[in-house]
Each structure stands twice: as structure tokens, then as C-alpha cells.
Amino acid sequence: MRYSLRVILLFQSTFLFSAVDCSSITIIGANYVGLVVAGVLIKCDHKVYCIDKDRDKIKLLKNKQIPIYEPHLQELLFKAPQDSLSFTDSLSEVPPGDLIYICVGTPSSSEGTCDCSAIYEVIDEIVSLKRNPKIICVKSTVPPGTHAKLKQYLMKKGLLSIKLVYNPEFMREGSALEDIMTQNPLVIASDSDKAKDDIEALYAPLRMKDIPVIKTSFETAEIIKYAWNAFSALRVTFVNEVAMLCKSLNANVFTVIQGVAQSERLLPTQVLKPGPGFGGSCFPKDTIAFTKVLEEKGFLSSLVHQAILSNKNHIQAIIRDIIGLLGKEPQQKTVAVLGLSFKANTDDIRNAPSVEIISALKKQGTCIQAYDPQAIPAMKRVFPDLIYCDSVYTAIQHADCILVLTEWEEIKNLDLARASQLCNTKVLFDMRNIYDPSLAKKYGFQLFNLGRQ
Ligand code: NAD
């Protein structure tokens, strides 16, 4: 195995710091994920009980055969000391322990929603057998919001002392062991900090390899897992669409990818930030032109089409939120718009979200006090009748809502204490996620941002 020596060394310190008793760990669901997790755990000299309700699978496993193909898994599981791993089809045959991993399947239902019933089945079984583990750690992939429901279910069933943890799995079939041991981030969610620490301690060797550890809320972890897969699917789909276009125009897809990959240098995924929608002279016009070429070649609903549509919807959703907040008499209200250019450090307002947003607010009769360090002359040509201000603070005076659209340095450095004294109503629409929510709260602002808690 390519990683074996490295991994053995790393795993020597595993579990040393764990506060839960991990002398035996129960894994429920013994297929792609459950067996790989079992392999990782027995590699650390822990006793693992694998449970699967599929008796044929258990029969195979008892005969030292794995029911799936995953490189190196067979030897990892069956070269371990004999008593370190056992298989059964019933939880009742396993001695009680502190830690239960849930690795059951969560397939699509007939409507396409995620069927989590197997997880509930497992919890019911834990209840009926009066098991009281310290931690139930879910590795199965579940839709955002599921753990809040699971927590309520545990409470309803009287399992009040059990700490629920979500530790989503990011392994890829075909390189699962390598992924878990050397690549994947460790995302751990729970209401209990101690339970998060306990699970982190299990993976101490991975931490030594500078693998990021993200400890967060259930909802954030659930979205990370879904967004991870969706983002990967989007990239694969995009490259397939580009390949078809290359095919129809006799271009070289490898060279195209080589070129496009360089865009990561200008817009690395790591620093992606949400905003009020893309604009400017290039993205809007070039994406539309690209869709025309794609349409000619038969791609009527390409990802590029969807990106344009999604951007439009995003701006409309922001407009709805602002208008909704202004209430019944928007014509009596004043909005301070901070930042007009489509991004900071340019005076370009072509296709800037500010144009569409201001236009919608004007239709409501709302008074606009606008400020931008560079883009006012350009905006005056589009909307001559706004109140243009010479500073952020003049724009904020007597405003019922502060709407931040561009992250110019001076807008980022807005003195929230001073701003709170100047405006009429302390409503802050931060469409660049630049203000610290606790600071905004400290100065009495009702803050609306884009997914920054
Ligand atoms: P799977 O469907 O292949 O295996 C699940 C196993 O759970 C099956 O063997 C099934 O018999 C067993 N099971 C179901 N209900 C049970 C019960 N009540 N008691 C005991 N056993 C039960 O699923 P998988 O591919 O191993 O994935 C498991 C979970 O992890 C899923 O939520 C999946 O989305 C997620 N995941 C999978 C991968 C992957 O590469 N396969 C990667 C990351 C996350």
C-alpha cells in the first residue's frame, strides 16, 4: 500500500486523547462507508463491531470476503488481529459501548428527497435494546436540517444523555482509504463541544498531517457535505459541456482546461465570497454570448444558461428582501446605497447589481441617497435624480436602511457607532458580508447579510 508506513506511524497516537471509552466501537451499516471506517479504526488497534441487517453481506464478511471492491480494504480488514473485528446482523449481539457510528444508506426516495428512515430505524433499535452510548456519530449523508430533527427524536425517545455528532464522510470510492487517511477535511458538528473534541481526538493522526478540522453547527456541516458534492458535480458537468463544444468546433479540450484552470489564480475557490450578484462589462456580456454559441450547438440549458438565470434570481431576491423590509410605505423611506460600481476599485457600473436594485427602489418611490468613491459620475448618467452624497456618512444621514453593495475600503471601514447615530432606522443590508455581526448588534443594527451568522 502506497500510504502504509506513513499511515501506521500516524496512527500510533490515535485515541490517546479520547475521553470516551473507545475500547470497542460499534459501526452500523457495513458497506462502502461503514467498512472503510471500520478499516481505519482497527488499524488503530481498536475492537470494532460491524453490524449490517443484510445477512448475506454478514455471511460473506464472516468468511473474510468483502461485499464491495475498494482497493486495499480486503487486506486491511482481514490481516488485522482476529478478535479486533467482528460482524453480526444484530445490535443485540454486540456488547454495549460508548460510541456508535451510523453508516447506513440514505438513498433517494421516489420523489428525489433523501430517505433517512434507516437512521431512525437504528435509533429505534438502540432504544428498544436500552443501549445508552455516550455518543452517536452519524456519518451517513443527510439533508440540511436533519440533525435538528434527529436531536428532537432522541429527546422524544428519552435518550437525553446521548450526544449526537455529525461527522460527514468525504471519501471517494476507489481511493477511500487514501482519502480518509491523507486528504479529507475533518468536519465535526454537535451541540456538545466535548463530544466534538472526543470525535476529533479519534482522528488525532490526521490532524498531525495539517488536515483542516472544521468544528461547526449541524446545519453548517450538513450544507458543507451537500455543497461539496454539488460543487464537484457542477465542475464535472461544466467540463463535459465544454468538451462537447470542443468536439463540435474541433478544439482541444485539454488545452482549454489548461487555460481555464489558470482562472483559479485570480479567483481561488478558497476566497470565493457571496455578493449582490455578478456584473461588470465581462461576465454578463460574455456569458450571454457564450450561451448563444452553446445554443447553436444544441446546448439549450447549459450550466452557463443556469448561471445567468441564477444571477438574475439572486438580484431579484435581494430586491424583494429590501422592499419587504421597507414596509407598507416605501415612498416614505430613504435608502442609503453605499457602493455603486459592480466591484471595488473600479468606476464601472455596467450591469452592476446596483443599477437594477436602485431602479426597483425608484419604482417604489423610495428616496435614494447614494455614495461611491468613483462611480457617481457614471451613475449620474443613468439616474440623474438620485441624491448623490460626498461621503458614506452624508449618505447614511436620516436613512431608514443602509444598503451596502460594494466593498470599497472606506465602506468596509465604516464606523458603525457613528453610522448608528446618523440613520433614522438601524437597518443594515450587508450584501458583501463585511461587517462583524456582533459589532452590528452591539450598535443596535438589525443586520441582513448573505449567510454570515
Ligand atoms: P450503502 O447503501 O452502500 O450501504 C449501507 C449499508 O447499511 C447497507 O449494507 C445496508 O444493508 C445497511 N443498513 C441499512 N439499514 C440498516 C439498519 N437499520 N441496520 C443495519 N444496517 C443497515 O451506503 P454507503 O455507500 O456505504 O454510504 C453510507 C452513507 O454514507 C450514505 O448516506 C452515503 O450517502 C454516505 N456516503 C457515501 C460515500 C460513498 O462513497 N459511498 C461517501 C460519502 C458518504
Image (cartoon, grey):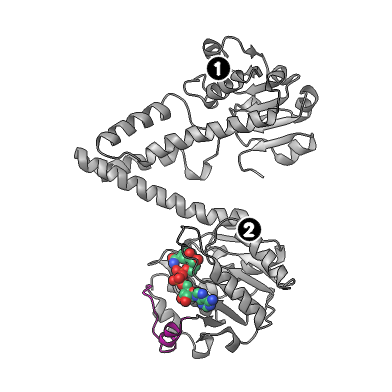
> x%, y% of residue 54?
46, 81
Q: Magenta residues?
A: 54-71
Check the image and report above or below for 24 versus 334: below
Q: Secondary structure at mark 2?
A: helix
Q: Label 2, on which residue?
A: 218
Confirm or reject: label 2 Cβ below 8 Å from ligand 1.
Answer: no
Check the image and report above or below for 43 versus 272: below
- Can see residue 125? yes
Residue drawn at 63 percent across, 72 percent down = 136
Q: Nearer the viewer, residue 216 or 292?
A: 292
Residue drawn at 26 percent across, 39 percent down = 298
Tell me the quadrant of the picture where the C terminus can be found.
top right
Residue drawn at 66 percent across, 31 percent down = 324
Q: Nearer the viewer, residue 127 or 368?
A: 127
Q: Label 1, on which residue?
A: 375
Residue drawn at 76 percent across, 38 percent down = 441
